[in-house]
């Protein structure tokens, strides 16, 4: 026969009180706490980067933490400083189109356009309508590709692997289009003062049309993948909140500003490159958190696709460069029959053009915010001073403000939502 199970014996020792438990578990820290045995916390300093996938480049962030909570954030920049601005002051205006797209390597055509506009203002260039339309079309496609990288890599930082493959599939289609036009996938060097380098290749309109036909459906798929995902909502809603006042005080621009409820877009407020001819909306959100910054860029991709469709319809045959031979290279056909064309070609290649003394600044709307190029000319063939107002540098200043108070995992989400490009920060 099996013995019946014995009942558990009750301990005669009474359960220790909370103070007793603390005395048993926690070591005596009287020397550190002035004779008290109370629990205390210590601040831990953690280095994130500069070689870390979540920093989206060579960004180093020094984080002071109390447990899992972020107490202080100090970003350290300069690891990708290349001296582009000083280098451009020692090159002719035409040569500088090589350097411009390498600062923001995800939206290089935005930098090319931002550089071309003030130079055109100085020399008084007249950009033909076809060239303006080509610029708008390619810049908006490049903006979409930049937002696709943001969306794919940002969600990858949060642990969502699948959207990365979706977004980069669409980005490849855009890079194929840009490669067909400029010969390179990232650093096209395609814009010129007074127009563009060459006309569009055969089959270009068909490539763009096929991409735009299916793109809206792809954006719907992205939204289904992450917007309704409860895990993504928990990781992004209410995280890294940037109020309207904070955004304005810090000088934040672009999608990060519009996600805080400020409707500012230079394509609408101060149109350039013919943007006043296009019908599009400026999406805004009021939450100011990471979720709003993610969703807003998805909505902006729809608007960029809308602009691209309109530009494709406006694309009519015509010249692609200013006919002024003082700033535009003559076509090869003229070199065979005109000595004057040969002289112009020789002077432009060896010396470049000479803008009159003066200065110019034109604000543009890049994928990350206000991008402006300030150029001072002393009448020579090289800029006397050139400076880029890069949006990533300014937007990164929000990190020490909105990155504190939450968990360390939330800091990774905040960095991703600001969408910094370190080439744009350091230059």
Image (cartoon, grey):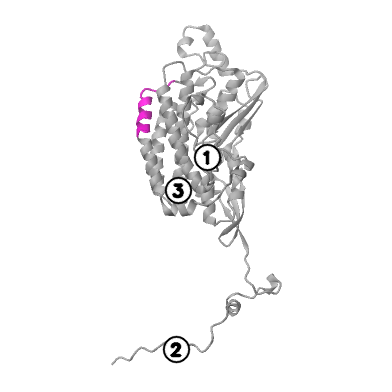
From where the camera sits, is residue 197 visible?
Answer: no
Q: Name which of mark 2 and mark 3 comes first in the sequence.
A: 2
Answer whether residue 176 is magenta in the image. Answer: no
**Dot placed on the residue nearer the N-terminal end, 2 or 1:** 2
Q: Nearer the viewer, mark 3 or mark 1?
A: 1
Circle 1 is placed at which residue position? 255
Mark 3, secondary structure of its residue: helix
In terms of depth relative to the viewer, which is nearer, 182 or 265? 265
Residue 421 % position (x, y)? 54, 41
Badge 1 crowding class, 10 Å Cα cut-off, few under 14, some 14 to 19, many 20 or more, is many
**Residue 155, label in figure:** 3
Marked residue nearer the N-terminal end (3 or 1): 3
Q: Residue at (38%, 32%) from the top-left corner?
A: 212
Secondary structure, magenta segment, majority class: helix
The residue drawn where x is 42% and y is 51% is 160
Query: What distance separates the C-alpha of mark 2 from that of mark 1?
Result: 66 Å
Q: Quadrant of the N terminus?
A: bottom left
Say what secondary structure mark 2 lies in: loop
The vertical placement of 22 against 395, above or below, is: below
Residue lying at the far left of the rendered structure: 1
Over which residues does the magenta segment extend? 199-213
Q: Is residue 333 left or right of residue 418?
A: left
Read off the residue under disc 2.
Answer: 9
């Amino acid at each position: 026969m099996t013995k019946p199970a014995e009942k558990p014996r009750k301990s005669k020792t009474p359960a220790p009180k909370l103070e007793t438990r603390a005395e048993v578990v926690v070591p005596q820290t009287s020397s550190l706490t002035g004779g008290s045995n109370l629990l205390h916390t210590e601040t831990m300093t953690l280095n994130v980067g500069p070689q870390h996938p979540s920093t989206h480049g060579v960004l180093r962030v020094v984080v002071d933490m109390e447990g899992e909570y972020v107490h202080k954030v100090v970003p350290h920049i300069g690891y990708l400083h290349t001296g582009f601005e000083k280098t451009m002051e020692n090159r002719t205006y035409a040569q500088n189109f090589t350097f411009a797209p390498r600062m923001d390597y995800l939206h290089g055509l935005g930098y090319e356009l931002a550089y071309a506009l003030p130079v055109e203002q100085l020399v008084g260039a007249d950009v033909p309508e076809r060239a303006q339309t080509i610029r708008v079309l390619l810049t908006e496609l490049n903006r979409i590709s930049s937002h696709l990288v943001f969306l794919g890599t940002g969600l990858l930082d949060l642990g969502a692997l699948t959207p990365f493959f979706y977004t980069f599939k669409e980005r490849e289609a855009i890079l194929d289009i840009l490669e067909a036009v400029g010969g390179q996938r990232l650093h096209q060097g395609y814009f010129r003062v007074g127009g563009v380098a060459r006309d569009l290749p055969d089959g270009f309109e068909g490539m763009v049309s096929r991409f735009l036909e299916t793109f809206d459906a792809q954006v719907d798929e992205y939204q289904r993948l992450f917007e309704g995902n409860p895990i993504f909502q928990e990781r992004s809603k209410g995280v890294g909140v940037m109020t309207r006042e904070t955004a304005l005080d810090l000088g934040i621009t672009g999608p990060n500003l519009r996600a805080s409820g400020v409707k500012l877009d230079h394509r609408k407020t101060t149109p350039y490159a013919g943007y006043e001819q296009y019908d599009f909306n400026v999406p805004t959100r009021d939450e100011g958190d990471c979720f709003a910054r993610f969703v807003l860029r998805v909505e902006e991709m729809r608007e960029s696709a809308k602009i691209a469709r309109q530009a494709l319809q406006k694309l009519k045959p015509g010249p692609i460069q200013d006919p002024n031979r003082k700033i535009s290279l003559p076509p090869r056909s003229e070199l065979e029959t005109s000595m004057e064309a040969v002289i112009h070609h020789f002077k432009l290649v060896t010396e470049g053009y000479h803008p009159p003394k003066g200065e110019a600044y034109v604000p543009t709307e890049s994928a990350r915010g206000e991008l402006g190029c300030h150029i001072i000319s002393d009448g020579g063939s090289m800029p006397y001073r050139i400076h880029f107002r890069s949006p990533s540098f300014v937007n990164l200043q929000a990190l020490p403000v909105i990155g504190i108070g939450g968990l360390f995992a939330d800091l990774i989400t905040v960095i991703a939502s600001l969408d910094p490009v370190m080439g744009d920060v350091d230059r």
